[in-house]
Image (tube, helix red, strand yellow):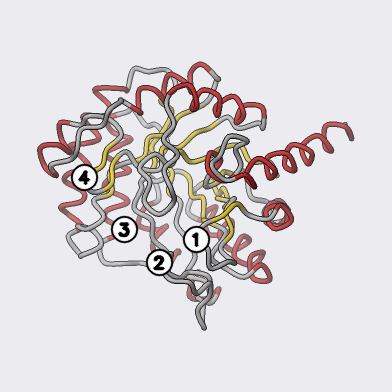
Amino acid sequence: MRIKGTFLDEISHDIPHQNWGREEWKKDFGYMKKAGIDTVILIRAGYGKWQTFPSAVLTSHEGAYRPPIDLVRMFLELASEFGMDFYFGLYDSGKYWINGKFQKEVDINKEFIDEVWNNYGKMSAFKGWYVSQEISRKTGQIIDLYAGLAKHCKDVSDGLPVLISPYIDGIKNVSQFITDTTKSNGITLKQHEKDWSEIFDGIKGAVDIVAFQDGHVDYDDLTGFLQLNKSLAHQFGLECWTNSESFDRDMPIKFMPIKWEKLRLKLEMAAKAGIENAITFEFSHFMSPQSAYLQAGHLYNRYMEYLNQFKSKK
């Protein structure tokens, strides 16, 4: 199992911003390409009042701040230069859908999707969409939100694929703003199956790919969830990827690059479960040789050694 894609976390929410410009980003795309990454996913194009390009929709509706650079155009240009597919992540208000105002979240995003497609849809690297609202359980009208936004994305773009990356309500699903790393109880496989059978049934035909985050459950339980996720996704006609997190949830410091042994273990579990593809959150902070974290470059070196082992065996 190789990591073929990564999120781009430019609207930083709970990890430090690295203050990169085009030169640093171009260098990072080179590192990604060398590591075999062929897909980049903008995790969100806006969060609250922060945005990745000067959107008339977000400025008008949310009073969003004007960014100093059009990051979306830059990412699309770099993706094209390095032969990568780019998936566009939608707007997350950080408030409306969380507070039960699901329709308001949908309405703003539909207008935003139209604007994005008009601005960037003709750029060659634009290959798909990412619905940024992350969930672990059926919450309020989340099925309608996912299905409505995914369908609108596909309608305006002549059917480009839509990706979601939910998480699992395991024992490591704790707030990033506390020092605890676990809670007493996590979701059972049976309950997870019930919840996601209902969600998948409601979004089939609209969402194409699901990549569950793999860091919220204990390592001993991960194989079971990976196998169940694959089975459920295929039952409802979705591709099943894994989002193999390259940061560590086992320490009170939120968040640091993961120990290579742990990342390798998770990738091997996904391979044994028959998962189709692996992406990560997130290369630039936690695996890049030019990351603000020194350990990230070492993780990159260990991962490249891992890839080279398989090349040498061929």
Please tell me in which quadrant of the rendered image residue 33 appears.
Answer: top right
Choose between 250 and 215: the one closer to the eye.
Answer: 250
Q: Is residue 39 left or right of residue 289?
A: left
How far apart are the two marked residues, 4 and 3, measured between alpha carbons?
25 Å
* Residue behind mark 3: 143
Label 4 sits on what residue type?
Lys
In front: mark 2 or mark 3?
2
Q: Are marks 1 and 2 in contact (CB under 8 Å)?
A: yes
SS for callout 2: loop
Residue 51 location, x and y as percent? 27, 38
Q: Which mark is residue 177?
A: 2
Residue 49, numbered circle: 4
What residue is pinned by disc 1? 254
Residues at badges 1 and 4 in contact (C-beta under 8 Å)?
no
Q: Amino acid at mark 3?
A: Ile
Q: Tell me what residue is drawn at x 51 percent, y 81 percent.
A: 185
Q: What's the distance in space between the residues labelled 2 and 4, CA to CA? A: 21 Å
Does residue 229 appear to the left or right of 12 in the view shown? right
Three-letter residue code for mark 2:
Phe
**Which mark sits nearer the N-terminus, 1 or 4?**
4
Q: Residues under labels 1 and 4: Cα distance?
A: 24 Å
3D distance between C-alphas at marks 1 and 2: 8 Å
In the displayed structure, would residue 201 be above or below residue 314? below
Q: CA distance from mark 2 to mark 3?
A: 28 Å
Q: Which of disc 2 and disc 1 is earlier in sequence?
A: 2
* Residue 45 quadrant: top left
User: Which residue is painted at 42% across and 57% down in the image?
Assistant: 200
Q: Of tags 4 and 3, which is closer to the observer?
A: 4
Q: Is residue 166 left or right of residue 276?
A: left
Say what secondary structure mark 1 lies in: loop
